[in-house]
Each structure stands twice: as structure tokens, then as C-alpha cells.
Image (cartoon, rainbow, N blue to C red):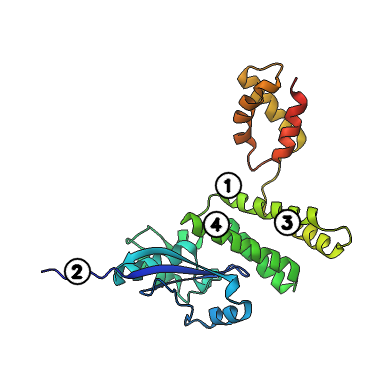
Amino acid sequence: MYKQLSRIYCVYIICCHINGKCYVGYTNNCDKIPTNINNSNFVNDYIKHGRQNFSIHIISNHLTLEEAQLLRYYYISKFRTDEEHDGYNALQVDEILKYTDNKFHPFTRETYKGDKKMDKQELVRKEMVEAMKEKNKPKKETLSLLLAALKNAEIDKMGILSESEEDAVVQKEIKQTKETLDLAPADRTDIIQECKYRIEVLSQFAPKMMTEEEIEATIAGVLSDLGIENPTKKEKGKIMKTLMPMVKGKADGKLVNQILEKKLA
């Protein structure tokens, strides 16, 4: 008789919302993920920032021990949680590749290290390091929160974010900050200044937004494609259905709506 394999293991990821760093591990105690991780950097941050600033996600469960060990390396490479990428996992690239190559994903040293275009996380991390060197605490904190938001979005997706998905995360952070700014009392100049500066920092990583002239031109193109010379309010739904996918993530939806409204009879 074959011995039944014990599928009691799971792979998990713990992320710090303050600095965006993560740790990937595995355990057979999946109902209560351990936080007593043997990593001094993690322990120091856990004590410094507190449990409330860390989130735990189970990435994969019902695994054998061997599957859990292999998948741990795979997710370390996928989410770049090794120390070389400013994560908590104390592993070298070559050690990770040893286990990931020809197992789950065709990683190479070049694709893993990102020898081509830097993604948003790499750009944010680079700017955050510069802010730390300059002792610019407000900028560092803003970038840390953005990095954590990008990392969490990647974990929720269970994969690498596309450029448009990264842009959506940045825009969401900007939108939330603008909402805080709008609600701030006039006499709370500290909150107002903090929000304005944060928006300025975040905007560096946002896609270039369309000008009113560019929106006007796009609307004109849509009307031409639809064969509409004198648009009416009844046709707004039809126009928006074609228009919005073209300007999504590139223009303020409220502004697009206002410009279109002016053209409707």
C-alpha cells in the first residue's frame, strides 16, 4: 500500500504596511500563522511598528511538505521578498533560482532581477531609499505607504501587476489623499500642507493625465466614429460606453463628463 501524503502545510506571506517589506514562509499550523520568524530585521520592525501594521495572507494551502518548500521559493521570487529586493527573506538570487527554474516558472537571473524596464515598485523603492538618505521623512513615509499598497495589490491578484494596474493603485492613493484634503478644516494647515505634499510625491508615479484639449479631441473622435454630428442627452450612454475605456486611467472622469455635457443638446 502507498503511504498517503500528509497535506497539512500552507505557504503564507506577511507584509509590513509601513515599509512595504514582506516575508514568505510555510507552516503546518495554518490556523494560526506564526510570527516568531527567525529574521532580525523582521523582528525589529514587528516590535517597532506593532502587529496592527502587518497583514498575513495564506497564498496556498493543503500542501505536502515538499510542495510547501518548493512553492515558498517560487513565491519569494514572484513577489521579490528576498533581501536583495528589500524584503525579509534572507536568500540569495542563485539559491532561489535553483529551486524555481524548471519547477513552477521559467525564471532566469535576468528576468528575476528585472534587467529591462523597472516596474513601479522598483522605482518607488529607489526613490524611498533616496528620501531616507536625504532624511526626508514625509517623502519616505508617503513612498512606504505607496510601496505597501502596490505590494498588497500584487498579493491580492496573486501575480505581477500590469502597468495599468500599477497606475490604478497610484491613482487610488492620490484620490484618497485628495478626499482627506477636501475634508480638512481650513484652520488645520498642518493636514492641508501634508496632503498637498503627499499628492505632489504620488503624482510623480501617476500616468500623465490628459489635458482638456486632448479630452475634447478624443470626444470628437468618438462622435465621428459613432456617426453622431449633434449629440443629445439620450445618446450620452452610448457615447460614454465607447469613450470611457479610451480615457480610463488617463483622464479625470468628472472632467470628461463635464466636457461631454457641454456638447449635448
Pointer 1: what residue?
Answer: 164
On screen, 35 above or below 116? Answer: below
Q: Locate residue 160 relative to residue 249 in the image: left or right.
A: left
On screen, 264 above or below 244? Answer: above
Pointer 3: what residue?
Answer: 177
On screen, 100 above or below 231? Answer: below
Which amino acid, by three-letter code, is at mark 4? Ala
**For the N terminus, which image quadrant?**
bottom left
Q: Earlier in the sequence, mark 2 or mark 1?
A: 2
State the residue lying farthest toward the right.
187
Pointer 2: what residue?
Answer: 4
Picture coordinates of residue 263, whole percent (x, y)? 75, 24
Q: Earlier in the sequence, mark 3 or mark 4?
A: 4
Q: Earlier in the sequence, mark 3 or mark 1?
A: 1
The mark closer to the camera, 3 or 1, is 3
Q: Locate residue 110 relative to residue 125 in the image: left or right.
A: left
Q: Are marks 2 and 1 in contact (CB under 8 Å)?
A: no
Distance between mark 2 and mark 3 Cα atoms: 53 Å
Secondary structure state at the residue bearing disc 2 = loop
Mark 1 packing: few (<14 Cα in 10 Å), some, or many (20+)?
few
Q: Are marks 3 and 1 in contact (CB under 8 Å)?
A: no
Residue 204 seen in the current view: no
Q: Are marks 2 and 3 in contact (CB under 8 Å)?
A: no
Instruction: Give residue 215's quadrant in the image.
Output: top right
Secondary structure state at the residue bearing disc 4 = helix
Distance between mark 3 and mark 1 Cα atoms: 20 Å
Mark 4 packing: few (<14 Cα in 10 Å), some, or many (20+)?
some
Which amino acid, by three-letter code, is at mark 1? Ser
Distance between mark 2 and mark 1 Cα atoms: 45 Å
Q: Which mark is residue 153?
A: 4
Mark 2 packing: few (<14 Cα in 10 Å), some, or many (20+)?
few
Picture coordinates of residue 186, whole percent (x, y)? 88, 58
